[in-house]
Image (cartoon, helix red, strand yellow):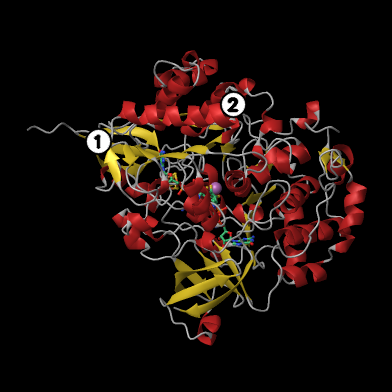
Amino acid sequence: MTTSDVKWVKTHCARMDHGGCGLLVAVQDNKIVQVKGDPEGFLNKGYICPKGAVSPDRLTHPDRLQHPLRRVGEKGAGKWEQISWPEALGIIADNLKEIRKKHGARAVAFGVGMPKGLDHFFQIRLANIFGSPNVIASQDVCHAPREITGLHTCGFYPVVDFHQPSKLVILWGSNITSTNEEGEICSRLLEQLKTGTELIVIDPRRIDLVKQSKQWLRIRPGTDAALALGFIHVIIKEGLYDREFVEKWTEGFAELAAHIEDYPPEKVEEITWVPAEQIRLAARAYAAAKPAVIHWGNPIEHSIHTFDATRALVCLMAITGNLDVSGGNVEAHDPKIMGLGSFVRADLVPDKRKELISAHYKIIPRLMTVAPAYFRRAVLEGVPYPVRGAYMMCSNPMLAYADSRLTHKALMSLDFLAVADLFMTPTAALADIVLPVASHFECDDIGHYGLGHGYILARPKVVEPPEECWPDKKIITELGKLMTPPELWPEDYHQLLEDLLKPAGLTYAQFVEKGYLKGPDRFRSYMEKGFKTPTGKVELKLSMAEKFSLKPLPTFDGYPEPEDPLFPLLLTSAKSRYYLHSSYRWLGKLRKLRPHPRLDIHPETAAKCGIADKDNIIIETPYGKITQQAHLTDGIDPRVLCGVPGWWFPEGNPETQFDWDKANFNMLTSVGRLGREYGTPNLKGLPCRISKA
Ligand SMILES: Nc1nc2c(c(=O)[nH]1)N[C@H]1C(S)=C(S)[C@@H](COP(=O)(O)OP(=O)(O)OC[C@H]3O[C@@H](n4cnc5c(=O)[nH]c(N)nc54)[C@H](O)[C@@H]3O)O[C@H]1N2
Ligand SMILES: Nc1nc2c(c(=O)[nH]1)N[C@H]1C(S)=C(S)[C@@H](COP(=O)(O)OP(=O)(O)OC[C@H]3O[C@@H](n4cnc5c(=O)[nH]c(N)nc54)[C@H](O)[C@@H]3O)O[C@H]1N2
Ligand code: SF4
Ligand SMILES: [Mo]
């Protein structure tokens, strides 16, 4: 057999995080033989992380799902038979239609995980056309709070502008060199640091970038709202705010100024453990640097107080004049492409806001997905109405949702569950039907659509998928034809990609040639039209507070979890550099780099408990216990531990769902307390205790 020449193809990385790096992929005989960062990559300029570098290994892994499967044994017993695609799709459509007939369309839920590509929006479109308002997502702990709080406060989602220079960057709970959050690839920030941009890090751990920072504020986990209020206090009391902007463009400044009397640095020090003098210095530096930008991370939304934390941060950006200025926190403008509402056919469910499961809980307007806590209540208790079936893709709720035991119960109790994935996971193991998907690299896709960053990325197919692995987009389109009006679906799913690009005057092929599309860099749009809020100003005090039962001003309402002498330490978490949430522990090259779930612990704390480096530790909260491995480091406060979410053991037994409960951080979390606005549970700042295993 002759081998063909190696061909280099340009695409973008995906599904190892939100994606973003431009890649050069070498292909030979339908196999990827090498991957490199593309020096011309719009976001990464040649950078590639360890996950991106091994991403082709997903395709050829021996454990990859290759055929549609039907459960033959008891639910979760790990016994399957191979079936054909028409059979699998028929079974799913029949079961979901049957549930719709019996209980109404809203009794069928459509699960999505972290947005990975266009499949996310295909799935929302399917739910809408099917007639169900219930798309279940982790948005309650991922981006919805910052995005929607932004919309209510200043009329847009203030994203970090790393495309223009800033004088100062605050990493507020963002470990960007590990997580490259939402395509904000760290290489852009690292370049800026070389040219003198200053850095402040707010993190309980000494993350890598602390080395390059001017200040490190070692915050007590779960107290970000208090720290932000402390910053506002200093800036207002010392007169460091942007007077002109505040006068012309904000509403409720006098009320905010009176309100923050309650948050002097000394008091905030007691709450947050950050020394008062450090709070003053950091707040002054942020107010003085023009422009300065806050890159906010997950911790601000991993707490029942996320509404207050995100509100306080947007107020902070506003009063310092850093909102919507070049190099500040900006409104990103999309290129001319099809709008999200049209793409997902939002017109077909005009009453979605009233019909959603979460409407019952009076969540904040504009949150259009259902928080996992409410989904499981609907399944297990029928509140506010029963949910009996689900189609899940790109998601592993057994690991991703707070309180995994509850997830197990809920998924076991569904009348029907179908899951689409690349691999058998603890969630797929509980399904009635499992579908094998084509990965990134194996289908044409568009990245970053709908994420609010003002650009989209071309992710053309570089190799053919194995015969029976289908792209999610194709699966959803075919399911759509079977259980919803077929005329609302194109013959071939590619047509929807073409439709999305039509307003830009581009075909998909032309878009691939360009590589990406970015909207205009436009700043201070408010100068012409005002802010898109009811008052036309940044609402430091929310004008619609009473109407929507929201707090008018941000406050700190105490620790997210009550202190408990039986659980004297505090547990927080950070995502692993080597994995994406629950994914990819089966890839040998990554597993070698991080073979075990690692818990950061201070040597003094370890010594007190007789724990040595690499010992297995039992971690207990009032809600559950798990085991992770001790990693001794003085880069953390002796009162704090930092574990890692997402761990299960793909090498384990499918009949016990791969030890889903052994090291899984969400065995330690609960949905007993939830933030009212977003339905968010506490994932950080949990009282805990430890012992040697
Ligand atoms: N305790 C705790 N809980 C958390 C978090 C935390 O920090 N701490 N983080 C939260 C956050 S921010 C998020 S976004 C969620 C993430 O939660 P999820 O999105 O559910 O988690 P992932 O592991 O990213 O993805 C789940 C599955 O998608 C599969 N997959 C990958 N590519 C594809 C594809 O192309 N098609 C299909 N069908 N499947 C694919 C993977 O194999 C994997 O099994 O978790 C949340 N949960
Ligand atoms: N490698 C990798 N990259 C990813 C992901 C992944 O799973 N792995 N997930 C992707 C997704 S969906 C998301 S949403 C992003 C999230 O990315 P990040 O926002 O960076 O999220 P985390 O890693 O959860 O937390 C970031 C930092 O917060 C610190 N921290 C912990 N508790 C607190 C606290 O109470 N307050 C403050 N201020 N800091 C605290 C942690 O020590 C950590 O360094 O990453 C994306 N990128
Ligand atoms: S940083 Fe993200 S987008 Fe870039 S190579 Fe790594 S996983 Fe891929
Ligand atoms: Mo996320």
Gap between marks 1 and 2, in whole Å?
Answer: 34 Å
Where is residue 441? Give x, y as percent: 34, 35
Tell whether 53 sits left or right of 543: left
Disc 1 marks a residue whose amino acid type is: Val
Where is residue 259? Give x, y as percent: 89, 56
Q: Nearer the viewer, residue 612 or 653?
A: 653
Q: Can I make out residue 66 in this image? A: no
The label number, if any, that marks residue 340 in the structure image:
2
Where is residue 344? Give x, y as percent: 56, 25
Q: Please tell me which of labels 1 and 2 falls first in the chain.
A: 1
Q: Residue furthest top?
A: 487
Q: Residue at x 59, y 78 (%)?
A: 638
Which residue bears the numbered disc 1? 27
Query: Taking 431 as reference, is 529 above or below it?
Result: above
Tell whether 474 sits left or right of 388: left
Tell whether 349 sits left or right of 574: right
**Mark 2 near ligand 1 (CB under 8 Å)?**
no
Tell whether 306 sits left or right of 43: right
Q: Quadrant of the C terminus?
A: bottom left
Query: Taking 331 as reference, is 632 above or below it?
Result: below
Where is residue 96? Give x, y as percent: 48, 31
Instruction: Determine the secondary structure under disc 1.
Output: strand
Local crowd at mark 2 within 10 Å, few (<14), some, or many (≥20)?
some
Pointers 1 and 2 in contact (C-beta within 8 Å): no
Disc 2 marks a residue whose amino acid type is: Leu
Instruction: Determine the secondary structure under disc 2.
Output: helix
Closer to the camera: disc 1 or disc 2?
2
The label number, if any, that marks residue 524 in the structure image:
none
Q: Residue at x 55, y 83 (%)?
A: 604
